[in-house]
Amino acid sequence: MILQIVAIVLSYLLGSVSFSLLYGKLKGIDIRQHGSGNAGATNTLRVLGKGPAILVLLLDVLKGVIAVLIGHWLGGESTWLPGLCGIAAIAGHNWPVYFHFRGGKGIATAIGVLASLALLPALYAGIIAILAIVITRYVSLGSLIFVILTPWILLVLGYEWPFFWTALVICLFAVWRHRTNIVKLVRGNENKLGSKGGDRLV
């Protein structure tokens, strides 16, 4: 039990490392004060450009992968702990202890978690999500499609219940964090990929 708690805490602390905020600080800014105000890869793209956005995206995905590995490493045969560690990492990204609990929306980290737990369901949902982004240019819509589809694909493909419940909690996290985006999508005034959505610094 102690090792399981340690694994979850470590995963949360790892998730709390916000690479978009750290990169912004290197440039002398708080990225939450620019663009959409979100501490994530999409806003990094809007504010700082493609290179930083790709770096932030990859590092945020890696956080999710490492969190699941921590769960496997310290959880032994537990089928629940890797998912719980993944959820903890996403919670850390969304509400980072190092940055006054004001973080991002957790999609990149969720990709790392879900792909590590169940690659094929995440891949299938990811392909549909990418197509939605290409067609509509709404990153938020593609993100929501990804997290909403993944648990049901897991269910259809017969994955064990810990995988489904983990994916469902991740889905609920993402929907909550995207609630303002959902309103904007309904109203038709959501920022599209490639739009500045605020002040571009580089």
Image (cartoon, rainbow, N blue to C red):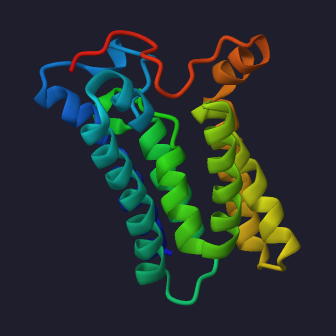
Of residue 111 and residue 171, the one placed in the foreground of this image is: 111
Relative to 62, residue 158 above or below: below
Residue beneath the point at 32% across and 44% down: 56
For the view shown, which residue lies furthest in the right direction? 156
Residue beneath the point at 35% across and 37% down: 97
For the view shown, which residue lies furthest in the front direction? 135
Residue beneath the point at 67% across and 48% down: 131
Residue 143 rendering spot, x and y as whole percentages: 62, 42
Q: Quadrant of the C terminus?
A: top left
Residue 23 rendering spot, x and y as whole percentages: 20, 35
Q: Quadrant of residue 65?
A: bottom left
Residue 188 rendering spot, x and y as whole percentages: 73, 13
Please indicate, yes or no, whether residue 200 appears anywhere in the rendered image. yes
Relative to 146, residue 78 above or below: below
Indicate left or right for 42 with 31 as reference.
right
Please indicate, yes or no, whether residue 81 appears anywhere in the rendered image. no
Indicate left or right for 179 with 139 as reference.
right
Of residue 57 and residue 169, the one placed in the foreground of this image is: 57
Residue beneath the point at 36% across and 31% down: 45
Indicate left or right for 185 with 80 as reference.
right
For the view shown, which residue lies furthest in the bottom direction? 77
Relative to 104, residue 35 above or below: above
Relative to 18, residue 43 above or below: above
Q: Quadrant of residue 114?
A: bottom right
